[in-house]
Image (tube, coloured by chain):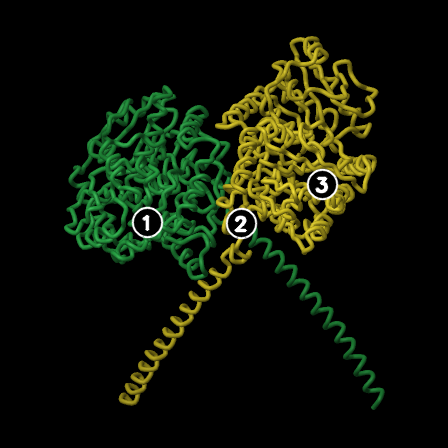
Chain colours: A yellow, B green
Amino acid sequence: GKLLVVPMDGSHWFTMQSVVEKLILRGHEVVVVMPEVSWQLGKSLNCTVKTYSTSYTLEDLDREFMDFADAQWKAQVRSLFSLFLSSSNGFFNLFFSHCRSLFNDRKLVEYLKESSFDAVFLDPFDACGLIVAKYFSLPSVVFARGIACHYLEEGAQCPAPLSYVPRILLGFSDAMTFKERVRNHIMHLEEHLFCQYFSKNALEIASEILQTPVTAYDLYSHTSIWLLRTDFVLDYPKPVMPNMIFIGGINCHQGKPLPMEFEAYINASGEHGIVVFSLGSMVSEIPEKKAMAIADALGKIPQTVLWRYTGTRPSNLANNTILVKWLPQNDLLGHPMTRAFITHAGSHGVYESICNGVPMVMMPLFGDQMDNAKRMETKGAGVTLNVLEMTSEDLENALKAVINDKSYKENIMRLSSLHKDRPVEPLDLAVFWVEFVMRHKGAPHLRPAAHDLTWYQYHSLDVIGFLLAVVLTVAFITFKCCAYGYRKCLGKKGRVKKAHKSKTH
Amino acid sequence: GKLLVVPMDGSHWFTMQSVVEKLILRGHEVVVVMPEVSWQLGKSLNCTVKTYSTSYTLEDLDREFMDFADAQWKAQVRSLFSLFLSSSNGFFNLFFSHCRSLFNDRKLVEYLKESSFDAVFLDPFDACGLIVAKYFSLPSVVFARGIACHYLEEGAQCPAPLSYVPRILLGFSDAMTFKERVRNHIMHLEEHLFCQYFSKNALEIASEILQTPVTAYDLYSHTSIWLLRTDFVLDYPKPVMPNMIFIGGINCHQGKPLPMEFEAYINASGEHGIVVFSLGSMVSEIPEKKAMAIADALGKIPQTVLWRYTGTRPSNLANNTILVKWLPQNDLLGHPMTRAFITHAGSHGVYESICNGVPMVMMPLFGDQMDNAKRMETKGAGVTLNVLEMTSEDLENALKAVINDKSYKENIMRLSSLHKDRPVEPLDLAVFWVEFVMRHKGAPHLRPAAHDLTWYQYHSLDVIGFLLAVVLTVAFITFKCCAYGYRKCLGKKGRVKKAHKSKTH
C-alpha cells in the first residue's frame, strides 16, 4: 500500500520510526513529510522523505525548548492554568507553526494530492498530521503515548469516569481521596476552559488551511485507529474503545551486546553492580546547585553510577560516578548487574525499566512523567522524588531503598512478566493495524454511533428530562386527584356532622 | 497448568469445547465438571470428566425446553417483564438447580478442593461456574456470547451509554430515535427491577452454598478475564474494558470437504445453487401452519433448499426442498454455490454466515437473536422477518431480494473480509488468555479501581453535590453582598433626595 507519514520531532519519533521502518521492510511505499529544521527527524530513512522549509531555525527551536525545560526546573506544572501561563506556550506555538509552512509549499501539497495514499500515519501532538488527514480526506492512524486535554475522550467518544480515572498532570492514582476526586473534576473543568486557548494557535492554522472553522473535535474525531503506547501494567485500567490498540512497551527490544566501554564499567563495578541515570533526550542541562546535590548523593552508594549528562560536570562528582554523553540505555538496563534506574519517568524509560525488570528512582519533570511516576510508585516498583524539593539525602535514601529492599525488585519483576506475556508483540500489532487501515480504507465498523449524537443526547439529558416530566406530571395528577378525593370525602363528613349537630340540638 | 472447566449445556458448549480441547492438546491437566443429565455435554472428551447426579431427568429437561421453545412461537419476548411472566422461568430454574446437586456431592467437592486448580474456565449462564469460582476462590475466565441483564456492565464496571448502546431483547440499532432511546432507558429500569427476581433462584442457591447472602455483582465481579463472542463486525462499537477479550467468530473453521450426499445435492442444483435453512440445534418443532407457509415460499425459488428440520414433514413441501435431520452447516455455507442462509440469527450461525460471506434471511426467535438480526440488517447483510407475523409471500420476497440484489452479497463480503482480517485467530486468543490467567493466578492489573467505589462515588454524585454546594454558597453570599451594597447605596441616595427635597420646598 501507499502510506503518508506525518511524524513529530523529539523522543516521540523514536518508536514511531521503528513502525515506519518495519512497514518499509514489508514492501509498502512510504512517504515521510517533515520540516527541514528538526532534532531527531533527519536520520536516514530508506523511503521517500519530503521536507519543507520552516519560519524558524534550529537555534530558535533549541532556545524555545531551553526556556521550556528551564521552566520545569522552577515549578512543576500541576494545572493547565499554570501550563497556559508558563513559557511553554512559546515553544508549543513554534511547533504548531510548521504546519502552515507545509501547506504554503504548493508543490509539496500538489505532490501529496496526486499521490493517492491509502492512509496517513501520524503523531497528533502538533495537530499537523490531523490537519493533513482531514485536508486530503485520508483514513488516519494516530500514534501517541496519550492525547492532550480531553481530546481522546472526545475524539474517540470514550468515557473516562472522573471518580477513578485521574486527569493528566495531577499525578494522582486511580484510588483517589474525596479531595483528589474534587481536584480531578476541577482539572476537567480547566481542560474545557483552557485547552481551547492552548490549541488556539493550532486550530487557527487548521481553520486557515481547511478554509473552514475547525474545532479540536473535528480534527481528532476523524481517526480510524488509535495506536496508544499504553499498557495496563503501567496505566490504570479504565474504559476504552474498540478502535484503541495498546502498544505500550513497543520501544523495548532484545538487549544487544554492550559496547566495550560499558562492558568494562560493569566488570569494574564488582559485586555491587551499576546504577543507570538518565533524564532523557530532552533534558541536557540541570541547574548547578541541583546537579551538585545529585552528585553528592550518588557518591554515597557502593554501586557504580553511569550518568548520562551533557551539562557542566559537577565539581563534587565522586569516583563511583561516570558521566557519559550517551549510553545504550535499554541494553544497560537489560544487564543482570544493573541494580536501579534513575529516570525522569518518561514513558520510554519506564517501559524499558519494566521490560528489563529494574526498579526505579523517579524524578518526574513535565508532561505525563508525574503520572507515570505515580503509577510505578503505587505498584511498588519505585520511589518518586520531587526534583525541585529533594535533598541529597532524599536521593541517597531513595536509591538505597530501591536497591536493598527486595520488594521493589519483586514488584518490577512481576510487572515485567505480566507486561511481556502478550499474544502479539506491540511492534507487530502496530504494523498490523496500519496495514488494516490501508487495506480497508479505514475501520468504519469500529466507529461508535456516539459521534452522531449531540452532547446532551449522548448523556441522555433529553430522555431523562422527558421521563422526569412524565413522572412529575403523573405525580402531580395523582396528587390532585387524591386531594380532590380527600376534599370530597371531607366535604361529605362535614355535611354529615352538621346534619348530626342540627338533630342533636 | 491445572484447569477446572464448568460448562453450560446446549449450543453454548460447541465453541467452549474447542477451547478446552486445544488446552488439553497443549498439555494442560483439565477437569470438566458436568451434570449427568445433559443434551450436548456428554460427548467424549480427552480429559477427566466429573459428573454429578441431578434432581431432574433428560425428559424433564426436554419438556421444560419444549414449553420454552413453544412459548417463543406464541409471542416474541421484547421486555424482561414478559420474559419474567412467561413459561421460560420453569426452564431457567430447572437449569439453575443443578448447581445445588454439584455441591451436595460431598466427595466431588472434596476432590475439587484438593485439586488446587490454577483457574476455572466457565460459562456464566446458569451461574454455577461463578459459584464454583467464588467457593474455591479461584481466578476465573468467563466464556460467553453476552451476559444477561446489566450484569456485564456491573461485573466488569463497563460504561454502556444508553443513548447509543441498545439493551438486549429490544432489537434496536445503535442509531436510536428519541422514542427508542426512551424505551432503552425503561428497559434498563426493567433490568434493575426484574433481573433480581429472574436470578432469585440462582442467587438463593449461591447464598446457600457460599453460606452468605450473595448478589449477582458478588458473583460476576470476581471475573479476571471476559472472553466474549463479540466482534465489531457483528456488534455495534461501544465502550469496553481492558479485561474483555473479543473472540467473535471462534466457531468458524476452514470448510471441510462435504459428505457425498450434500455434494450430490449441490451438483444437482444447476446454475441456481442452493439455500441452507436451519433454525439451530435448539428448535426442533415448528407449528404446522407456520411450517406449511414456509414450505410454500421455499417452493417458489429456483434454488435447491436444504432444510434442517426434525419436525413433521409439511405436506406441501416442493421438489426443490430437501429435509435433513442434520447438515454440515459451516461447510455448506463455505461452498461457492450457496446463495443464501435462512437462520434464526443465533450467533453461531450468524458468524458462520459472516465468515463464509453468505447473505441471510433471519427469523429471530429468542435471546440475542433479535439483536443479532437487527445488526446484520442495518449493515445490509440480510433481511429480518417476524416469524410470527410473516406470510409465505414475505419469505419469498425476502429470499429473492437477498439472492438477487447484489448489495447484500457485497455487504456480507465486506463484513467477511473485515472480520477475518485480525492479528490473532479467536481460538488462539482464547487459549492464550486462559493460560495467562493460569500463569499469573488471574489478571489483577486489569481490574479497574471502580470496584472499590460505591455507586454514588462512581457517578461522582458526592463530588458534584459538594461542588454545587460550594457554587451555590458562593452565589448566595455574592448575592447577599450585592443586595446589601445595593441597599446601602440606595439608602444614601434616598437620604440625599430627601435632603434635596426639603431644600427645594
CA distance separating discs 2 and 3: 26 Å
Taking the spot 82% from the left edge, 37% from the top edge, the residue there is A57
In front of the other: label 2 or label 3? Answer: 3
Vertical placement of residue A483 versus B342, above or below: below
Vertical placement of residue A429 versus A325, above or below: below
Q: Is residue B453 left or right of residue A218?
A: left
Precedes in sequence: disc 2 or disc 1: 1
In front of the other: label 2 or label 1? Answer: 1
Q: Which residue is mark 2?
A: B460
Q: Report the chain holding disc 3.
A: A
At label 2, counting other C-alpha atoms closer than 10 Å, the crowd grade (few under 14, some 14-19, many 20 or more) is many
CA distance separating discs 2 and 1: 46 Å
**Location of the C terminus of chain B (image quadrant):** bottom right
The amino acid on which the numbered mark 1 sits, given as a three-letter code, is Val
At label 3, counting other C-alpha atoms closer than 10 Å, the crowd grade (few under 14, some 14-19, many 20 or more) is some
The answer as to whether the residues below labels 3 and 1 share one chain is no
Q: Which residue is mark 3?
A: A77
The answer as to whether the residues below labels 2 and 1 share one chain is yes
Judged from the image, the secondary structure of the residue bearing numbered disc 1 is strand
**Location of the N terminus of chain B (image quadrant):** top left
Of residues A117 and B252, the one drawn nearer to the viewer in this rendering: A117
Q: Which residue is mark 1?
A: B361
Q: Report the chain holding disc 2.
A: B
Judged from the image, the secondary structure of the residue bearing numbered disc 3 is loop
Q: Position of residue B207 (x, y in %)?
A: 31, 39
Judged from the image, the secondary structure of the residue bearing numbered disc 2 is loop
Of residues B409 and A138, the one drawn nearer to the viewer in this rendering: B409
CA distance separating discs 3 and 1: 60 Å
Q: Position of residue B477 (x, y in %)?
A: 66, 62
Q: Report the chain holding disc 1.
A: B
Q: Position of residue B488 (x, y in %)?
A: 75, 72
Q: Is residue B447 left or right of residue A340?
A: left
